Image (cartoon, grey):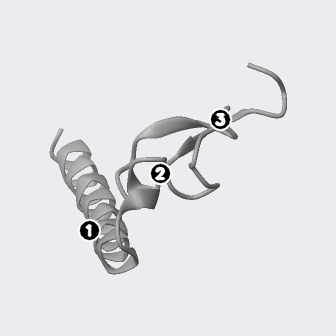
Amino acid sequence: MSEANQRRTCRACGQSYDYPGHQSMATRTYCENCIELPEPARRNFERMRRRLDRLEKSLAELKSQQT
């Protein structure tokens, strides 16, 4: 992988991908699978992804407080 390529995380699905990929439709924020989704669906996935991340973080904090 050259220095120009970077490993990114899709905002909608959380998948890690190389950007820019050779002949890839991926953008800086979305993997090539999610970029093909209609924008309203992509926004909903992104919102739910953020919500899941917050819940996972809260759960990890609660678990660490109990031990």
Vertical comparison of 67 with 14: above or below: above
Residue wearing tag 2: 10
- Position of the N terminus by quadrant: top right
Q: Secondary structure at mark 1?
A: helix
Mark nearer the N terminus (1 vs 2):
2
x and y, in percent, of residue 6 in the image? 70, 35
Q: Residue furthest bottom?
A: 40
In front: 36, or 60? Answer: 36
Kind of residue at badge 2? Cys
Q: Residue at x 37, y 67 (%)?
A: 46
Q: Name the residue that disc number 3 marks.
A: 21
Q: Going 31% across and 61% down the picture, which residue do you hit? A: 49
Q: Nearer the viewer, mark 3 or mark 1?
A: 3
Q: What is the distance, in whole Å, between disc 1 and disc 2 at their CAs?
A: 13 Å
Q: Residues within 10 Å of mark 2 (few under 14, many from 20)?
A: many
Considering depth in this image, is 61 or 34 the residue closer to the camera? 34
Q: Residue at x 15, y 46 (%)?
A: 66
Disc 1 designates what residue? Answer: 48
